[in-house]
Amino acid sequence: MSNLASSPGEKPGRRTFLSGIIGLVISTVATLVGLPAIGYIVSPGLKRQNPEKWLTLGPLTSLTPGVPTGFPFSRKIKDGWVESTQTGVAYAVTHDGQNVKVFSNVCTHLSCRVTWNEERGGFFCPCHDGLFGLDGQVLAGPPPRPLDQFQVKVENGQIQILLEA
Amino acid sequence: MAETPITEPGRLQAMLEWLDERAGLRTIWKTVFARTVPRTNWFYTLGSATLILGMLQGITGMLLTIYYVPTPDHAYDSIQYIMNEVAFGWLIRGLHHWGATLLIITVFLHMLRTFYMGAYKYPRELTWLTGALLLLIALVFGFSGYLLPWNQKAYWASSVGTSIVGAVPGIGPLLLRIVRGGEEIGAVTLARFYSLHIWWMPLAALLLIGVHLYLVIRIGITAPPERDE
């Protein structure tokens, strides 16, 4: 403080100089810790842990028109340091051997797994007898909406689906 | 009041005056920082060095708790996450890790200086006493923090370290079970060491540092003894 700057036996500049040095050291340390700390706190929020990804199911020629083919898939899911595996079956359906729709096997009612049921002529959910048609539409039971579809593309004759982030 | 145009520094000065009039900032500054001290040497800065390191340990420690989880199935992985995935995680943990070692060194050197300069004598016995307790607290900090990474070194060092308690005659085995929270080092041990490390020791240290600093400011520090003293 200024009124203390000149105590007896000391040159006026010395105290100011030392205060400056101390201030400089303190602000350097504060910056060296403070700035990285900001990055440390915000970084997980800025990083996508599970980027969207195209998954190859198989050749388009392996499909029989009018009969769904199930492709099991699994994928690692990261939640911070916790890793888990997401599994599912993607049902690929084609009518003309050209255009493909790929359905998720998760029932839209209460997320049970549906399977293709030849006798019933649809995707059947064992939990509450939900039934979906070849194009995913609800035929019977409680499901509120059609089966979810994956985004699909065909490259070099291979069917690929988009696993969302 | 003088009729001077209000410039920015003038306004800042006015704000400080306002605060000072109500909170006595100038008195605090004079008592704590601008107090008179005898002619000393660089060894007299070891206490301040320890205090600064302690503050750094507090801040980096608080940052580490943002990601660290003290359970056997998450402790190791969450530290790997801090080291490899979080931005500057390696730096924050590194500061905490090396700061801990450095702090033990400065605490010890600070104690040696106090001892060799005879600064523990009347009227500063209480300062010495709280300092001795703070040394013990620093050691408990170090020991409890050592288990938290939950790697092989942490596990076995803590296994050996805690077993020392078991050597107490008679009640040793019982004490050991209480310290570990069971027969072996496990989930309970990790949780209680963590609690010790981030709640009980910091609060105890804060309290004792408060007393320690109050006494230093109230009594003042010693000059290095003269040759004929």
Image (cartoon, coloured by chain):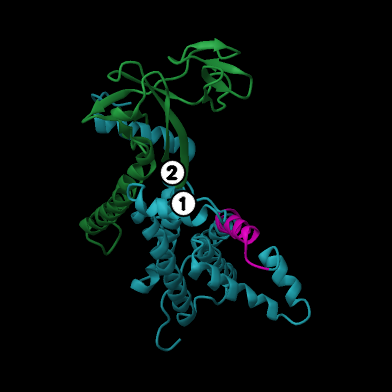
Chain A takes which shade in the image?
green
Q: Three-letter amino acid code at disc 1?
A: Ser
Tag 2 residue? A80
Asked if marks 1 and 2 touch (Cβ < 8 Å), the reply is yes
Residue A67 visible in the current orientation: yes
Residue drawn at the location 56% of the way across and 20% of the way down: A119
Q: Amino acid at mark 2?
A: Gly
CA distance separating discs 1 and 2 = 8 Å
- Residue at horizontal 78 percent and vertical 80 percent from the top: B170
Residue at the limit of the structure toward the right, as seen here: B170
Q: Is residue B223 above or below residue A92?
A: below
Chain B takes which shade in the image? cyan
Q: Quadrant of residue A95?
A: top left
Q: Is the stretch drawn in magenta largely helix, strand or loop?
A: helix
Q: Residue at x 42, y 22 (%)?
A: A67
The part of the chain drawn in magenta is: B184-202
x then y, percent, for residue B140? 57, 67
Q: Position of residue A60 (x, y in %)?
A: 29, 28
At mark 1, the secondary structure is helix
Residue B141 picture location, percent across and down = 54, 64
Q: Residue at x 66, y 66 (%)?
A: B180
Residue B58 in sight here: no
Q: Is residue B29 magenta?
A: no
Disc 2 crowd, CA 10 A, few/some/many (<14, 14-19, 20+): some
Q: Nearer the viewer, residue B215 or B67?
A: B67
Secondary structure beneath dot 2 equals loop
Q: Which residue is mark 1?
A: B78
Residue B119: x, y in percent? 49, 76
